[in-house]
Image (cartoon, rainbow, N blue to C red):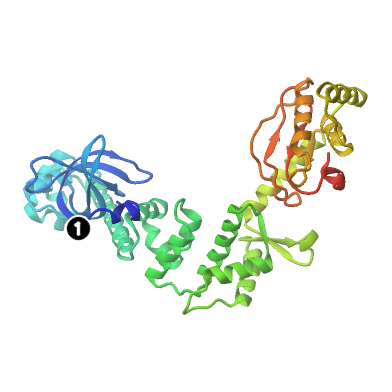
Amino acid sequence: MSSSPREHETYPTEHLQGIVERVTYHAEDSGYTVARLKAPGARDLVTIVGRFPDIHAGQSLRLVGYWREHVKYGQQFQVVQAQETKPATLTGLEKYLGSGLIKGIGPVTARRIVAHFGLETLEIIEQSCSRLSEVPGIAQKRVAMIEHAWATQKAIKEVMLFLQGHAVSTTYAVKIYKQYGDQAIDVVSRNPYQLAADIYGIGFVTADTIARNIGIAPDSDFRYQAGILHVLQQAAEDGHCFLPEHELVERVVKRLALPESPVDPARISALILQMAEAKQLITQPGYGDLADQRICYAPAFYHTEQALATRLSAFVRRPVVVDLSRVQRWIDKYTQKRGITLSEEQRQAVELAASSRLLVLTGGPGCGKTFTFRCCSRKGNERSSEVASVYSKLCLRFVSQLVLPHLFAQRKRAGTFVQGFSPVLPAHPTLCY
């Protein structure tokens, strides 16, 4: 039952109270709801829009939100916060109980219950549900069903009140309840940072805000561990599958430090070790320029990298049969016809492209990658073979931190050509397959 903060700031907040007349739309996964509300003094039904974990006709609601004009549907009340209130009339009670909110009570049964208990109906269900057997037509089996359904609704309300009482927006509160159900209060109270791992749309920043609101210490292990994963996620958005341990510690200390709570680097290093032992992180000895350090992966990136490397390795091991002399004759004919000259390295790259299943073509700006690449592509188009491929953008930073933006081939080619950045091919023969 919330909107974005920016949108909310542009509208004055108002209060609205009424009874839900009907629910036009309700999404079970997100809680997004469009409903019609009967508000006292309003001539027509009011359209309300927001996020509700559960909503039924007959519910009495006290809402906080703002009015806005929808281009197609006209004036709507955008709900920011909602609280259910008890129906104040017998008619309201009948509609509330008979709306389908409580399994086992339909419109006819609701009418009988309200006729028997009057305005004390909800108190009877809440405190002495067994007394429903006094109502004609309600057997003990149905009483048990009603009691269970009422307890479920009560649990939903308790979770929502707890979360909203700690400044959790209704949008997130609905997601949290959908994820954890009746265990939501326990999970959030114990480790709110678990939300960032389990619920899409709730990141470290949101979880950190919730943690501060419920009183989790800023130097708790939960916060530091979540911060480590958050920093690795941020690095991934910049194209890094891993970070050297020293750099990871520095970034975490900088990201998590607060004026009143500095972060001890030694403690972060110790937590990295603990997380590695618990498989929450994957650490390995570094290589190349990082040979004297350990490198740290989030598990998802490590396993993705390994799977991609395995598939590429299996791909390049499949042999390619090619008549190299024919390729060389084609290069001579092609360059002569267009009046162009290939350097020795460029010519070698074209020959490798024709005889290899995978080629990594790298080099700095202006070294002739694009020109060579076009020759490779032209040669591939004029050949026929069985290899299917795709033209798309791809990043393979694990290969000497290359950025390989073009991975493609065509059904008529026997190889895949990859263009990227770094020293030119002959200087790195191990990158040619």
Above-or-below relation of 362 to 375: below
* Residue projecting furthest to the front: 339
Q: Disc 1 residue type? A: Glu
- Coordinates of residue 145 in the picture (x, y in percent): 26, 47
Above-or-below relation of 120 to 392: below
Q: Residue at x 87, y 44 (%)?
A: 426
Which type of secondary structure does the marked residue at label 1 adopt?
Answer: helix
Residue 113 appears in the figure: no
Q: Residue at x 16, y 49 (%)?
A: 133
Of residues 1 and 326, the one drawn nearer to the viewer in this rendering: 326
Residue 214 appears in the figure: yes
Relative placement, left or right, of 234 versus 78 is right
- Coordinates of residue 96 in the picture (x, y in percent): 16, 46
- Coordinates of residue 196 in the picture (x, y in percent): 48, 58
* Residue projecting furthest to the right: 325
Above-or-below relation of 426 to 276: above
Relative placement, left or right, of 188 versus 300 is left
Find disc 1 in the rendering and name its residue.
Answer: 126
Question: Mark 1 Cα within 10 Å, few/some/many (few <14, many 20+)?
Answer: few
- Coordinates of residue 433 in the picture (x, y in percent): 83, 39
Relative placement, left or right, of 189 versus 336 is left
Image quarter of residue 155: bottom left
Image quarter of residue 177: bottom left
